[in-house]
Image: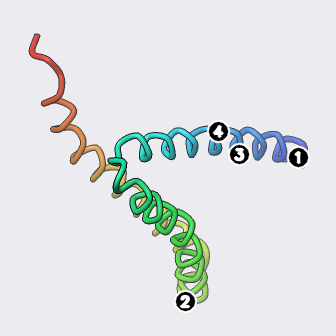
């Protein structure tokens, strides 16, 4: 199953899903910002998501040189899981408050 065609199909599918999700968040951020602050909000959004990639690449490269790729990827996985847990814990109370009482 580890063939180039399978990898290319998986890569194309992932790229399409990533593009769709990125457009959804872009629209969501623009919709939530007030008219007078929309430009500033979008500038910060772009700075974080486009500029953060460059900084993260340097940090990941340094970590790979120091600890090796296996530990670096493991650390990245743990950080992603921790971010997901924090996001769920922060958003869950807000989501529960916004739902009408049954």
How packed mark 4 is, by other alpha carbons closer than 10 Å (few <14, some 14-19, many 20 or more), is few
Q: Circles 1 and 3: CB distance less than 8 Å?
A: no
Q: Which residue is mark 4?
A: 17
The residue that appears at 9% across and 15% down in the rendered structure is: 101
Query: At numbered mark 1, what does the secondary structure look like: helix, strand or loop?
Result: loop
Relative to 102, say whether 25 is above or below: below
- For marks 1 and 4, the one nearer the N-term is 1
Query: At numbered mark 2, what does the secondary structure look like: helix, strand or loop?
Result: helix
How packed mark 3 is, by other alpha carbons closer than 10 Å (few <14, some 14-19, many 20 or more), is few
Relative to 4, say whether 56 is above or below: below
Q: Report the side of 75 relative to 36 (left or right).
A: right
Q: Camera-side residue: 4 or 34?
A: 34
- For marks 1 and 3, the one nearer the N-term is 1
The residue that appears at 73% across and 38% down in the rendered structure is: 13
- Disc tally is 4
- For marks 4 and 2, the one nearer the N-term is 4
Q: Circles 4 and 3: CB distance less than 8 Å?
A: yes
The residue that appears at 52% across and 38% down in the rendered structure is: 24
Query: At numbered mark 3, what does the secondary structure look like: helix, strand or loop?
Result: helix
* Farthest left residue in view: 101
The N terminus, quarter of image:
top right
Q: Nearer the viewer, mark 1 or mark 3?
A: 3
Q: Which residue is mark 3?
A: 15
The residue that appears at 51% across and 71% down in the rendered structure is: 52
Q: Position of residue 3 (x, y in %)?
A: 88, 46
Q: Which mark is residue 3?
A: 1
How packed mark 2 is, by other alpha carbons closer than 10 Å (few <14, some 14-19, many 20 or more), is few
Q: Which residue is mark 2?
A: 66
* Farthest top residue in view: 102
Q: CA distance from mark 2 to mark 3?
A: 31 Å
């Amino acid at each position: 199953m580890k063939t180039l065609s399978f990898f290319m199909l998986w890569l194309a599918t992932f790229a399409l899903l990533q593009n769709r999700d990125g457009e959804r968040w872009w629209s969501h951020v623009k919709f939530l910002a007030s008219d007078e602050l929309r430009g500033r909000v979008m500038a910060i959004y772009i700075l974080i998501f486009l500029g953060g990639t460059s900084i993260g690449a340097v940090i990941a490269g340094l970590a790979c040189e120091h600890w090796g790729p296996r530990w670096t990827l493991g650390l990245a996985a743990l950080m992603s899981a921790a971010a997901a847990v924090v996001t769920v814990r922060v958003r869950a109370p807000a989501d529960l408050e916004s739902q009408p009482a049954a």
